Amino acid sequence: MSPIHRAEGEISAIGRSTEILKAFLGSSGTLSPAALVRRTGMAKTTVYRMVEDLARVGLLERHGTDYRLGLLLFEIGESVPRQRSLREAARRHLSALREATGHNVGLAVLDGSDVVYLEVFRGEDGPRLPHHMGGRWPAYASCSGKAILAFTPPAQVAQLEFAMKAHTENTITDPELLIRELERVRKSGVAFDRQEAFLRIAGAAAPIFGPDEEVLGAISISGMAGRINLTRIDAAVRTTAISISRDLSSAHSVVRPVLQRH
């Protein structure tokens, strides 16, 4: 049963609020109440009442006659411990990798069967992709997603539901082929996107591990196929991921003794 429903099947107020906030995913940033009615499928009176309530508490903001996500959501998101520490540890490494290569660089985490981008550094020579901070993409069709899935416990991966839709003619849509691909990633430590998400776009990604060796996310680098040399960036992306993992472990080891003295 969906968490937005009560036991008797009725959508709860929290569930309705969640659906309205989720409607902003993939939008231009602002939506009218009428657009929210279309995107959520909820009754007009319900949506109009809910957006007023959400704006009153700061989860939405008025923008003329439209609405956009409020700063309170950003503040809450910045307080998520895993995301905050991961972004803080990764930022300077991502910036250095972007400057060294001129390609697009990203930081992503797994959320269900998708990856969510926590950071996107666009390179001067990098293609303009729809990926952006907070954006989602199917994990099976992403080098970042494959890098994370390869080091996620198999039982957890087996519980995920992938639509396996073909985004290009190169997208892996066979579950058995995906399993074999993840085995290759596990052995090499790097995942590739060979024009699987977008035609003419290629990339590579490597996993980031926490102090307990749990995979936390992945960094990726992408560019125009033919301009980006996957063999050469293989080492760069792996080295950067290792450096971020080490910084996370070092920060953990510095904090723990302080906590133990109290």
Image (cartoon, grey):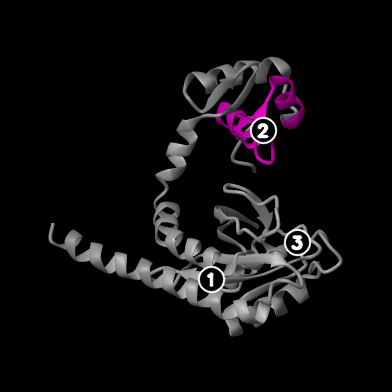
Q: Residue at x 77, y 67 (%)?
A: 195
Q: Are marks 3 and 2 in contact (CB under 8 Å)?
A: no
Dot 1 falls on a residue whose secondary structure is strand
In the image, residue 183 sits, relative to residue 126, either above or below, namely: below
Q: In front here: 131 or 224?
A: 224
Residue 37 located within the stretch drawn in magenta: yes
Q: Quadrant of residue 192?
A: bottom right
Residue 129 tag number: none
Q: In front here: 13 or 107?
A: 107
Q: Position of residue 56 (x, y in %)?
A: 49, 18
Q: Position of residue 142 (x, y in %)?
A: 68, 64
Distance between mark 1 and mark 2 Cα atoms: 40 Å
The residue identified by callout 3 is 197
Magenta segment range?
12-39
Distance between mark 3 and mark 2 Cα atoms: 36 Å
Q: Residue at x 61, y 68 (%)?
A: 149
In the image, residue 217 sits, relative to residue 112, either above or below, namely: below
The residue identified by callout 1 is 207
The reply to whether residue 218 is in sight is no
Distance between mark 1 and mark 3 Cα atoms: 19 Å
Foreground label between 1 and 2? 1
